[in-house]
Image (cartoon, rainbow, N blue to C red):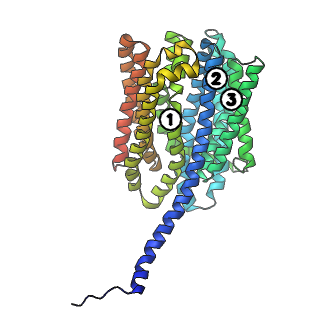
């Protein structure tokens, strides 16, 4: 048999598919470069603002007042956690599936979701008002701050929704603009309040609302979040879809809040608001990496949901392996740096010896951050596949570990025992979620 050398025409024909694949890869890299860049600008600006506000308030306010601010702030996080779980994290998969059936569906979804979020904001604000008056006789210090939180809460709910909407529409630049506006307004306001000697627990809460309002105006000017007419039937339909997708996540969010943020009110009740402020100041050093991974989560989830809708659920399992290693590895490297540098960083940043003396408590806090990063990466795969019940189950197992470990370790280690119980709960939830993300089982609705 005679072998013929390949001709120039044959070589050109073979090279054409390769050039096409390289060109497609180049176009994808260009698109993702912009997506990731603006996602990091968004999350970086938002995270940096909250980080700096925490540092400033921990330095400027008396330790007791800062601890009270932290307790009220955890109430806002509770409301936010349910919104993220019930509404925000459910939307990408709903958008991805509906838009493939109806190319005009996203506009109606935008308007319907806006009204769902407004309703949630008003309802939760009423709950905060009732809570404020209920605890007034017991802790009157918190009443004014809680009423301030009720006033700004609907604005915060809209901010969170519009931020995710920008990612769903592949408009990460709008989210970055919102974060930058929020940061500039909030930080400038903090310095003005301090200069006027008007910084207090209540004014610090109201300032968050001012920054959020400025960000909403910026989003509207960029074409995101403008109110539109929508039929009541569309709002009801979306509310039902959100409930189907997010009912398990909302229950999981409540449990997650108990095992993480409820630590601050618990410490405030048992050891004083000042101790809660110290723990928050320590945790604040670890929040940049939490927000960094959150930026990846925001940028990646809508696209993973699109890919799963296109090619099938197996893509979610393929993604889970790689995302878990990436998220956990980044968190581990950052936490290692903070633990080594803590003796120098804490006195320089906060200038309060009580905070520097508690550096050893960074260890359980860092462990919880790394484990939660692992869980967060696996959660992307499950959300894209609309598998949410396992997240609820994982949280309840984590809660059981937290309660049992908290009672046992608190008796031996005090406040440190509660923090180590939080790390143990994070490990339990992460193990269950990762195992589910890598399995090929489906969920009944």
Q: Residues within 10 Å of mark 2 (few under 14, many from 20)?
A: some
Residue at 76% across, 25% down: 192
Residue 417's place in the image compared with 159, above or below, is above
Question: Which residue matches tag 3?
Answer: 208
| Image x and y of residue 217, in percent | 75, 42
Question: Which residue matches tag 2?
Answer: 56
Residue at mark 1 to residue at mark 2: CA–CA distance: 20 Å
Mark 3 vs mark 2: give the one in front: 2
Residue at 70% across, 19% down: 202
Q: Residues within 10 Å of mark 3 (few under 14, many from 20)?
A: many
Residue 319's place in the image compared with 359, above or below, is below
Image mark for residue 290: 1
Image mark for residue 372: none
Mark 3 vs mark 1: give the one in front: 1
| Image x and y of residue 242, in percent | 55, 44
Q: Is residue 391 visible?
A: no
Q: Is residue 348 visible?
A: yes
Between 441 and 325, the one lying in front of the other is 325
Residue at 37% across, 48% down: 321
In screen coordinates, is 94 left or right of 154?
left
């Amino acid at each position: 048999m005679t072998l013929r050398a390949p001709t120039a025409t044959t070589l050109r024909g073979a090279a054409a598919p390769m050039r096409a694949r390289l060109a497609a890869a180049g176009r994808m890299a260009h698109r993702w470069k912009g997506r990731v860049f603006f996602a990091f600008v968004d999350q970086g600006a938002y995270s940096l603002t909250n980080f700096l506000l925490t540092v400033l308030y921990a330095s400027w306010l008396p330790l007791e007042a800062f601890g009270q601010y932290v307790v009220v702030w955890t109430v806002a996080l509770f409301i936010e956690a349910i919104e993220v779980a019930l509404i925000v994290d459910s939307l990408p998969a709903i958008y991805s599936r509906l838009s493939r059936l109806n190319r005009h569906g996203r506009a109606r979804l935008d308007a319907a979701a806006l009204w769902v979020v407004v309703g949630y904001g008003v309802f939760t604000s009423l709950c905060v008002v009732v809570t404020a008056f209920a605890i007034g006789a017991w802790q009157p210090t918190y009443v004014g701050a809680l009423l301030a939180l009720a006033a700004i809460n609907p604005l915060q709910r809209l901010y969170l929704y519009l931020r995710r909407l920008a990612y769903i529409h592949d408009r990460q630049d709008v989210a970055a603009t919102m974060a930058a506006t929020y940061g500039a307004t909030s930080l400038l306001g903090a310095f003005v309040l301090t200069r006027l000697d008007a910084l207090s627990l209540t004014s610090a809460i109201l300032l968050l609302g001012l920054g959020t309002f400025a960000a909403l105006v910026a989003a509207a000017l960029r074409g995101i979040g403008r109110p539109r007419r929508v039929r009541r039937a569309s709002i009801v339909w979306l509310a039902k879809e959100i409930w189907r997708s997010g009912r398990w996540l909302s229950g999981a969010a409540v449990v997650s809040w108990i095992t993480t943020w409820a630590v601050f009110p618990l410490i405030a009740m048992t050891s004083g608001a000042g101790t809660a402020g110290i723990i928050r100041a320590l945790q604040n050093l670890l929040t940049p990496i939490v927000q960094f991974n959150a930026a990846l989560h925001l940028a990646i989830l809508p696209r993973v949901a699109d890919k799963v809708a296109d090619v099938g659920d197996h893509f979610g399992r393929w993604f889970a392996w790689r995302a878990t290693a990436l998220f956990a590895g980044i968190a581990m490297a950052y936490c290692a740096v903070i633990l080594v540098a803590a003796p120098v960083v804490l006195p320089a940043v906060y200038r309060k010896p009580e905070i520097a003396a508690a550096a050893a408590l960074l260890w359980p806090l860092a462990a919880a951050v790394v484990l939660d990063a692992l869980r967060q990466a696996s959660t992307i795969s499950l959300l894209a596949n609309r598998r949410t019940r396992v997240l609820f189950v994982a949280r309840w197992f984590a809660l059981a570990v937290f309660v049992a470990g908290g009672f046992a370790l608190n008796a031996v280690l005090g406040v440190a025992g509660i923090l180590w119980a939080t790390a143990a709960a994070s490990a339990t939830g992460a193990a269950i979620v990762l195992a589910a993300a890598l399995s090929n089982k489906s969920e009944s609705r």
